[in-house]
Amino acid sequence: MPAPSEGRSAGGDIGSGSGDIGKGAGKGAGKAAEGVGKGAGDLVTLHPLGAAENVGKGVGEAGKDVGVGTVKGTGKIAKGTGRLIAKPFHHSKKQASKDAPAPQEESPHA
């Protein structure tokens, strides 16, 4: 029976974290552009208060999305980096080789 999987590797955590940061930035840029677009439409239709509100809302949502993606991604990167740094210090208990000679006991009559 195969050993249970330990989940994602350290490199996988780092890659996934980088992806989360990128997704957050992309989503935030989309929200900012959406707010600016709605604000421009309000300016054209002579609704300056609506324009300011939409631009502000878009920027606020963009900041939230970028922040969430950055925090989530940074956490995964830190976890993966910690696992990489700790790896040399985690020694597995290795059993003696079957080919190795057994240790010689001293004779009590020597």
Image (cartoon, grey):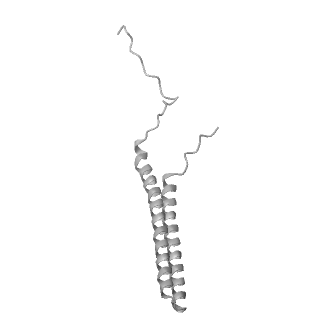
Count the numbered circles shown: 0
Q: Position of residue 17 (x, y in %)?
A: 49, 60
**Considering the image in quadrants, where does the C terminus appear?**
top left
Most extreme residue toward the right is 1
* Image position of 13 with respect to 21: above or below: above
Q: Is residue 34 left or right of residue 79?
A: right
> Which quarter of the figure is the N terminus placed in?
top right
For this rendering, which residue is in front, 12 or 29?
Answer: 29
Taking the view exactly as shown, the residue that stands out farthest to the left is 110
Where residue 104 appears, as percent x and y from the top left, is 42, 19
Closer to us: 56 or 105: 56
| Horizontal and vertical percent position of residue 47 | 51, 88
The structure residue drawn at horizontal position 41% and vertical position 46%, both measured from the top left corner, is 86
Q: Residue at x 52, y 56 (%)?
A: 12
**77, above or below 106, in the image:** below
Up the image or down, 89 lies above or below 13; here it is above
The x and y percentages for residue 20 are: 51, 63
Front residue of 37 and 72: 37
Residue 90 vs residue 35, the one in the foreground: 35
Rendered position, 41 above or below 68: below
Residue found 43% across the figure and 39% down from its top: 91
